[in-house]
Image: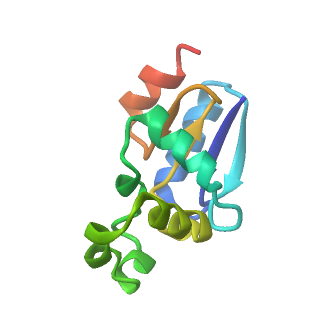
């Protein structure tokens, strides 16, 4: 079963959720704003998706701008990044999807087809 971390009001998350519905793939939706992934889950997703921790930030988000994360990013350690992300799901780029082995960050239809459709 897949775990999809998303936000119901996010159009990109809706596209990802529709992908799983159309392909009849079992998934669990986790509201990333209410239950953000733990630091350990974020490390796992980052590693499995091949995405650096710094790229897990939702750079177009309101809170990213309000907290001036862009200015802080060059001096943040991985531990600092994990504290911020695990403590505030609105800072996380979405959707995050994992099957416990692989992971993806964001939604691109071809990426989902390549990663999730064959499973």
Task: Name the colouring of the figure.
Answer: rainbow
Q: Quadrant of residue 114?
A: top left
Q: Foreground residue, 15 or 80?
A: 80
Residue at image location 70% in from the left, 47% down from the top: 29
Relative depth, front residue between 90 and 54: 54
78 is higher (above) or lower (below) than 72: above
Residue 72's x, y, as percent? 31, 76
The quarter of the rendered structure image containing the C terminus is top right
Image: 18 above or below 87: above
Quarter of the image where the N terminus is located: top right
Residue 62 percent across, percent down from the top left: 41, 79
The residue positioned 52% from the left and 41% from the top of the image is 45
Query: What residue is rendered at 63% in x and 29% in y?
Result: 99
- Residue 42 at x, y percent in the picture: 55, 49
Q: Is residue 59 left or right of residue 63?
A: left
Residue 38 locus on image (x, y percent): 65, 55
- Residue at the spot x=52%, y=34% of the render? 103
Direction from residue 23 to residue 95 in the image, left or right: left
Q: Is residue 27 left or right of residue 96?
A: right
Tell which residue pokes out farthest to the bottom in this image.
Answer: 66
Q: Quadrant of residue 4?
A: top right
């Amino acid at each position: 079963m897949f775990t999809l971390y998303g936000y119901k009001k996010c159009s990109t998350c809706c596209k990802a959720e529709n992908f799983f519905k159309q392909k009849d793939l079992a998934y669990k939706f986790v509201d990333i704003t209410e239950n953000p992934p733990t630091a350990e889950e974020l490390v796992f997703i980052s590693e499995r998706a091949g995405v650096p921790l710094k790229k897990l930030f939702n750079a177009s988000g309101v809170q990213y701008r309000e907290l001036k994360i862009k200015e802080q990013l060059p001096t943040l350690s991985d531990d600092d990044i994990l504290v911020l992300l695990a403590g505030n799901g609105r800072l996380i780029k979405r959707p995050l999807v994992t099957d416990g082995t692989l992971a993806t960050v964001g939604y691109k239809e071809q990426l989902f087809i390549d990663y999730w459709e064959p499973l």
